[in-house]
Image (cartoon, rainbow, N blue to C red):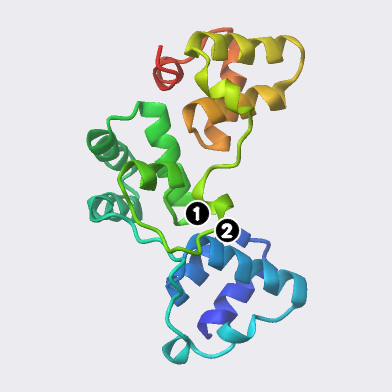
C-alpha cells in the first residue's frame, strides 16, 4: 500500500487527525499544509497536483513548515514512546509553565503531531515568511481586553458563565486564559460543575 493509499484509508475511516499526521510524516511538511492537503482530498476526491507523485520525487517541503527547537526533540521522543508523564515533566522544566498548560501542549503534540504556536514562540522557534496569521496565533476566544484582567476576575467570569448556563463560553475562556487543550478545558469545567471547586492544577494554570 502506497503512502497516499494509507492516508486515504484513514480519511475513509473518518480518522482525519490520523490522516494529517501520516501526511506530515510522509511529506515532511508543516501542520497547516498537511491539514490543507487532507481537506482538499476530502472535498475534491483527489490530491493537489504537487502531491500526486511519490514522496521521493516530490518537491522539497516549502518554507512554511515550522521546525521544532532542538530542545523539544527529547520530549518528542518521550511522547512517541508513550511516556507522557516524563514528557510533561521535561517540558515544564524547560518552559517554567504550570502543569495544566504544559499538559495541554503535550496533548496537542500527541494528537496533532505539532507543537502549539505559543510554545514555539516562547522558545524562539523561527518560521517561514509565508506562515499565515492564523497559524502564528491561537484563534482568540475572548476580546483583547480579557488578556489584561487579573486571573481572579477571569475565574469569576468563567464561573459566571456556568451560573448562566453558558458552558461553551466558560470552556472557551478557560482555554484562552490557560493555554489548555479543548479537551482539558472541558474536563476542568465539568469537574468544577460537579464539585464547585477547581482542581489545583487549574488554579496553577490561572496563576493563582
Residue located beneath label 2 in the image: 17
Give me the residue at 27% from left, 30% from top.
Answer: 96
Q: Quadrant of residue 182?
A: top right
The local crowd at label 1, few if under 14, some if 14 to 19, many if 20 or more residues have their Cα within 10 Å, is: some
Q: Estimate the x, y position of residue 141 in percent, counting from the top left.
A: 63, 32
Do the residues bearing badges 2 and 1 touch, measured as CB atoms within 8 Å?
Answer: yes
Give me the residue at 57% from left, 36% from top.
Answer: 183
Give me the residue at 49% from left, 51% from top.
Answer: 111
Disc 2, SS: helix
Image disc number at residue 112? 1
Q: Quadrant of residue 9?
A: bottom right
Q: Is residue 121 left or right of residue 159?
A: left
Which of 6/36 is in front? 36
Which of 71/108 is in front? 71
Against 72, is 196 above or below? Answer: above
Against 140, is 130 above or below? Answer: below
Regarding residue 187, the answer to whether it shows in the image is no
Q: Is residue 168 left or right of residue 112?
A: right
Amino acid at each position: 500500500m502506497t503512502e497516499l493509499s494509507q492516508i486515504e484509508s484513514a480519511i475513509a475511516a473518518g480518522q482525519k487527525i490520523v490522516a494529517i499526521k501520516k501526511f506530515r510524516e510522509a511529506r515532511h511538511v508543516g501542520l497547516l499544509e498537511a491539514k490543507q492537503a487532507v481537506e482538499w482530498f476530502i472535498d475534491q476526491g483527489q490530491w493537489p497536483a504537487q502531491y500526486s507523485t511519490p514522496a521521493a520525487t516530490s518537491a522539497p517541503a516549502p518554507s512554511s513548515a515550522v521546525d521544532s527547537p532542538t530542545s523539544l526533540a527529547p520530549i518528542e521522543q518521550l511522547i512517541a514512546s508513550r511516556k507522557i508523564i516524563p514528557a510533561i515533566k521535561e517540558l515544564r522544566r524547560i518552559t517554567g509553565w504550570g502543569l495544566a498548560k504544559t499538559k495541554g501542549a503535550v496533548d496537542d503534540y500527541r494528537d496533532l503531531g505539532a507543537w502549539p504556536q505559543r510554545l514555539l514562540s516562547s522558545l524562539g522557534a523561527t518560521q517561514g515568511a509565508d506562515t499565515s496569521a492564523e497559524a502564528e496565533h491561537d484563534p482568540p476566544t475572548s476580546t483583547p481586553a480579557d488578556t489584561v484582567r487579573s486571573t481572579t476576575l477571569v475565574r469569576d467570569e468563567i464561573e459566571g458563565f456556568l451560573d448562566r448556563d453558558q458552558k461553551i463560553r466558560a470552556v472557551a475562556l478557560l482555554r484562552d486564559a490557560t493555554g489548555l487543550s479543548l479537551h482539558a478545558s472541558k474536563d476542568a469545567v465539568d469537574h468544577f460543575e460537579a464539585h464547585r471547586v477547581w482542581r489545583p492544577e487549574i488554579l496553577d494554570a490561572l496563576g493563582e
